[in-house]
Image: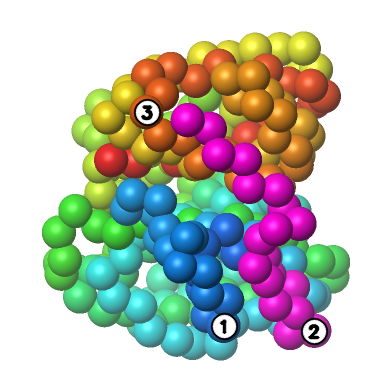
Amino acid sequence: MIEHRPFATLGGADHGWLKARHHFSFANYYDPRRMGWGPIRVWNDDQIAPMTGFPPHPHADMEIITYVREGAITHEDSLGNRGRTVAGDVQIMSAGSGIRHSEYNREPGTTTIFQIWIEPTQKGGPPAWGAKPFPKGDRSGRFTALASGFEEDVDALPIRTKARVLGATLKKGERIEYAIGADRRGYLVPAVGTVRVNGTLIGARDGAAVANEAHLAIEAVEDAEVVLVDAA
């Protein structure tokens, strides 16, 4: 099953400095049919105005992955971590027993991100943060694990859940496959471009909710950049 969720049907909010679209129920957007997808609890599509951002706020018991699409995001937290993550790169935060952090766009232009929250396999534990570059050329025509809870994904940022966050860039007409397993769920969003997922047309920033599919075949209708979460 591939359930197409067009961008126009997503929840959202316009705070002036922040324009957000929500693939799942979040903040003031509530849809009982879209409370999450397996352990995936949040997938937000955020546009953050220059010199603005999220002031310090707490999190606990959540794996938070930020995929930067344009611009850069600057992170600071109560552990003393500070980092700037630029377009194409990824940061992760394991909130664990509790952490406070801020995320600001310190850039002269708009920053756009996907922020994905996945429930951890176990609650508690010390919080942690990390970031890493993932050059788009290195994932041309193939999926690369960006964040993963599986030990074999040695080059991915570690998260504390049995899930993978994968990225790929595709040229028009290019096709890749991914063995997800019929017992798992997936959620795919093209950051750029239109693709077909097992024959279903998915436009830029649309969602594709995947269940009961052993394999995924992704074909680029135009040049595309896709993000896929493979979760239990």
Residue at left 84%, top 66%?
Answer: 109
Counting residues from the N terminus, which is met first, the one under dot 2 or under dot 1? Answer: 2
Over which residues does the magenta segment extend?
1-21
Which residue position holds label 1? Answer: 28
Q: Label 2 is placed on what type of residue? A: Gly
Counting residues from the N terminus, which is met first, the one under dot 3 or under dot 1? Answer: 1
Label 2, secondary structure: give it: loop
Badge 2 vs badge 1, beta-carbon distance below 8 Å: no
Find residue 168 and report its image quarter.
top right
Residue at left 77%, top 12%?
Answer: 173
Which residue position holds label 2? Answer: 16
Marking on residue 212 = 3
* Image coordinates for residue 5, horizontal then vertical, percent: 63, 47
Q: How is the image coloured?
A: rainbow
Q: Is residue 138 placed above or below 48 in the rendered structure?
A: above
Q: Is residue 117 visible?
A: no
Q: Label 1 is placed on what type of residue? A: Asn
Find residue 125 and report its image quarter.
bottom left
Horizontal side of residue 59 vs 205, given as left or right: left
Q: Residues within 10 Å of mark 3 (few under 14, many from 20)?
A: some
